[in-house]
C-alpha cells in the first residue's frame, strides 16, 4: 500500500447561500483544493453528500459534479453515509490512492440544506434512521440525542453546565474562523437559557441548518512535489458501523462504531490518544461530542463532559478540539462536514491556521459520525517533517 | 406513503410482533432475519409484552413535517417485560408527568396522515399503565 498525502484543501463558508446552487458550492471548494494542491490532473472523483435527493431532487452526483468540474471521463462516485459521508468518502479516496488504482483523487463534500423549510429538513435528517420503526415514532435526530443525554446525566450524575461547555468552546473557536456559520462567542448561561429543542437538549447544543462544501486532493506521498506546503500524510483511516437502532444496543451510551474505528486507526497509526495534538469531534448535538470524547479514548465513561469543563480541550488546553468551531459553530452541512474536519486539520498541521493555530501540531484526528453513531469514520493525519 | 409499504408493516405495528432467536432466545423489535447476538438465522415471530418501563425519553418540540400538528409530544425508549426495547411515543400524559422508570402499556393510536387525501397511518403508542 502506498502512503497517501493530503496535497490540497479548500472550502466555502458555511451559511445560507441563497443565490448559490449545489454545483456552485461544490465547484468553488473543489477549485480551491485543486489550486492549493498544484495538481494538474485528477483521475478520480468522490462526492460526499447525504440528501441531495430529498433536498434538491438531484441524484447521480458523481456524474453531476464530474461534469461541473469538466473532468470527464474520469470515474466519479457519490458516497453516502448520512453525516459521516465526508469522513467515509475520504476513507474511500485514501483506499483508491493507497492501492494504486488512482493517483490524484479529489474528494469533495457538499450539502445544501436551506432549499427546504426546517420541518422538511427534520424529515430529511431522520432518513438516517430506520424509517419504519424510528422515524415512524416522530422522533427527530436531536430527539434521539436528547434520549441519550437524559440517560447520561442520570447515570453519571452530570450537570447540564458541564455538557454546555462544548458549544461554548466551539463558538469561542469559530469566532476567528472566516468560514464559520456562527462566528461569535456564547456562554453557558446563553446555552442553557436557549429554548428547548428536544428536552433536555437546548437549541444552542445543536448544529444548525446550513449550506457548504469542502474538498481535498489526495495523492501518493512520494509524488508530492507539486505542493508548496509542508507535507501532511494520512497515518490511518478507519470506518466502523453499529446497529442502526438504538433499541438494539446493549448500552446506548457506548458508541461502538466510534470505539471500533478509533481502535483500528490507533493500531494502524501506532499512536494513542495522548499523541493527538489537535482533535475534531462530531458534536452534531453536544452530548454526541461528549460520548465521542469518551469512546475515542480521551476520557473515561461518564467523564467526557468534565473533560470539556476542565479546559483540557479548549484551544490552549492539552488536546485542542474543534479548533475552527466544530459542528456546532463552524456548521454541519451534512455530507461536507467530515471534509471540513480534514481541511481544518490540514491547516493546523501545516501551520496555516492563523489565530486558531495550535503551536507545533504534528498529529491530528478527525471523527465523523452518521446517524446516532451507526457509522463512524476516524482519520488520523500527520505532518511529516516534524 | 404507498399503500403496500404501509400494509406490509400492519401486522407488526398493530399487534406488536417482534421476533425471537430460536438458538439463544434473544428478542428483537423490529423483526430481523439474523440474530444480532449469536448470528443464527433461525428466528420466529413472537408477540411482544405490551407492558414496560421508560428507560429514557425526550419531548419533541420541532418535529418532522408529518408530525407538526402533534407537537410537543413525548418519545421514549421503553424496555418491555420480555427484555426487548422499543422506541415509541408516550401519550395520555403531559411532558411534566413522564419520568424514568415509569410503567407504561401499549395502546393503538393514529400516527400520521399523508396529506388531505392520502392514507391515515395507525399503530402502537404507549401510555401510563391504567389497569
Image: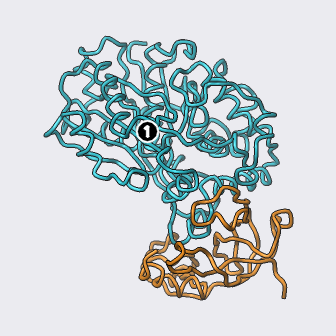
Chain bearing tag 1 is: A
Which residue lies at the image location 72% right of the left edge and 80% below the top edge? B81
Nearer to us in this view, B40 or B13: B13
* Residue drawn at (64%, 42%) of the image: A294
In the picture, which chain is cyan?
A
- Left or right for B10, reference A155: left
Chain assigned orange: B
Relative to A261, A316 lies left or right: right
SS for callout 1? helix
Q: Residue at the location (60% across, 41% down)?
A: A207
* Quadrant of the drawing holding the N terminus of chain A: top left
The C terminus of chain A lies in quadrant: top left
Q: How is the image coloured?
A: by chain
Which one is in front, B19 or B62?
A: B62
Q: Quadrant of residue B125?
A: bottom right
Is A192 displayed left or right of A120 in the figure? right
Report the residue that reaches farthest toward the left.
A73
> Residue, x 50% and y 16% (percent of image)?
A353
Expressed as whole percent of the image width and height from the top left, the position of residue A113 reads 48, 45
Does residue A83 appear left or right of residue A30 in this picture?
right
In front of the other: B75 or B47: B75
State the image coordinates of residue A21 (x, y, percent, origin top left): 38, 39
Which residue in the structure is indicated by mark 1?
Answer: A336
- From this viewpoint, which residue is outermost toward the front? B116
Up/down of A224 relative to A334, above or below: above
Query: In the image, residue A296 lies at what x, y percent?
Result: 57, 40
- In this rendering, the answer to whether A208 lies above or below A313 is below
> Callout 1 environment at 10 Å: few (<14), some (14 to 19), or many (20+)?
many
The picture places residue A164, in percent across and down from the top left corner, at: 74, 37
- A47 lies above or below B128: above
Amino acid at each position: 500500500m502506498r502512503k497517501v498525502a493530503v496535497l490540497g484543501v479548500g472550502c466555502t463558508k458555511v451559511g445560507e447561500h441563497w443565490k448559490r446552487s449545489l454545483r456552485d458550492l461544490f465547484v468553488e471548494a473543489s477549485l480551491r483544493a485543486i489550486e492549493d494542491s498544484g495538481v494538474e490532473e485528477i483521475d478520480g472523483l468522490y462526492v460526499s453528500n447525504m440528501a441531495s435527493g430529498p433536498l434538491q431532487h438531484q441524484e447521480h452526483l458523481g456524474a453531476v459534479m464530474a461534469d461541473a468540474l469538466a473532468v470527464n471521463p474520469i470515474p466519479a462516485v457519490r458516497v453516502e453515509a448520512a453525516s459521516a459521508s465526508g469522513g467515509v468518502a475520504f476513507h474511500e479516496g485514501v483506499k483508491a490512492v493507497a492501492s494504486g488504482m488512482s493517483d490524484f483523487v479529489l474528494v469533495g463534500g457538499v450539502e445544501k440544506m436551506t432549499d427546504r423549510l426546517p420541518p422538511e429538513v427534520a424529515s430529511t435528517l431522520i432518513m438516517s434512521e430506520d424509517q419504519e420503526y424510528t422515524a415512524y415514532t416522530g422522533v427527530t435526530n436531536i430527539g434521539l440525542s436528547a434520549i441519550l443525554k437524559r440517560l447520561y446525566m442520570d447515570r453519571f450524575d452530570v450537570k447540564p453546565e458541564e455538557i454546555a461547555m462544548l458549544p461554548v468552546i466551539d463558538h469561542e473557536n469559530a469566532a476567528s474562523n472566516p468560514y464559520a456559520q456562527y462566528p461569535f462567542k456564547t456562554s453557558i448561561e446563553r446555552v442553557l437559557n436557549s429554548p428547548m429543542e428536544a428536552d433536555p437538549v437546548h437549541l444552542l447544543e445543536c448544529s444548525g441548518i446550513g449550506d457548504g462544501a469542502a474538498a481535498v486532493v489526495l495523492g501518493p506521498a512520494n509524488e508530492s512535489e507539486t505542493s508548496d506546503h509542508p507535507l501532511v500524510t494520512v497515518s490511518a483511516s478507519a470506518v466502523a458501523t453499529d446497529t442502526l437502532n438504538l433499541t438494539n444496543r446493549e448500552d446506548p451510551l457506548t458508541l461502538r462504531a466510534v470505539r471500533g474505528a478509533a481502535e483500528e486507526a490507533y493500531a494502524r497509526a501506532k499512536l494513542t490518544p495522548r499523541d493527538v495534538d489537535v482533535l475534531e469531534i462530531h458534536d452534531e448535538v453536544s452530548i454526541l461530542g461528549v460520548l465521542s470524547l469518551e469512546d475515542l479514548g480521551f476520557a473515561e465513561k461518564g467523564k467526557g463532559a468534565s473533560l470539556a469543563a476542565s479546559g483540557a480541550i479548549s484551544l490552549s488546553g492539552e488536546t485542542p478540539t474543534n479548533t475552527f468551531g466544530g459542528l456546532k459553530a463552524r456548521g454541519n452541512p451534512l455530507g461536507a462536514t467530515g471534509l471540513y474536519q480534514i481541511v481544518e486539520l490540514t491547516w493546523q498541521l501545516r501551520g496555516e491556521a492563523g489565530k486558531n493555530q495550535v503551536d507545533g501540531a504534528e498529529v491530528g484526528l478527525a471523527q465523523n459520525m452518521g446517524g446516532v453513531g451507526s457509522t463512524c469514520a476516524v482519520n488520523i493525519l500527520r505532518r511529516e517533517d516534524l | 406513503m404507498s399503500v403496500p409499504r404501509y400494509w406490509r408493516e400492519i401486522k407488526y405495528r398493530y399487534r406488536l410482533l417482534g421476533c425471537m432467536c430460536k438458538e439463544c432466545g434473544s428478542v428483537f423489535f423490529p423483526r430481523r432475519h439474523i440474530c444480532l447476538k449469536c448470528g443464527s438465522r433461525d428466528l420466529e415471530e413472537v408477540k411482544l409484552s405490551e407492558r414496560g418501563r421508560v428507560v429514557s425519553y425526550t419531548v419533541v418540540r420541532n418535529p418532522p413535517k408529518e408530525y407538526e400538528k402533534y407537537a410537543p409530544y413525548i418519545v421514549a425508549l421503553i424496555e418491555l417485560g420480555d427484555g426487548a426495547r422499543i422506541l415509541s411515543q408516550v401519550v395520555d400524559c403531559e411532558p411534566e408527568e413522564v419520568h424514568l422508570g415509569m410503567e407504561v402499556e401499549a395502546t393503538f393510536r393514529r400516527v400520521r396522515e399523508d396529506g388531505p387525501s392520502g392514507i391515515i397511518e395507525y399503530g402502537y403508542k404507549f401510555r401510563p399503565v391504567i389497569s
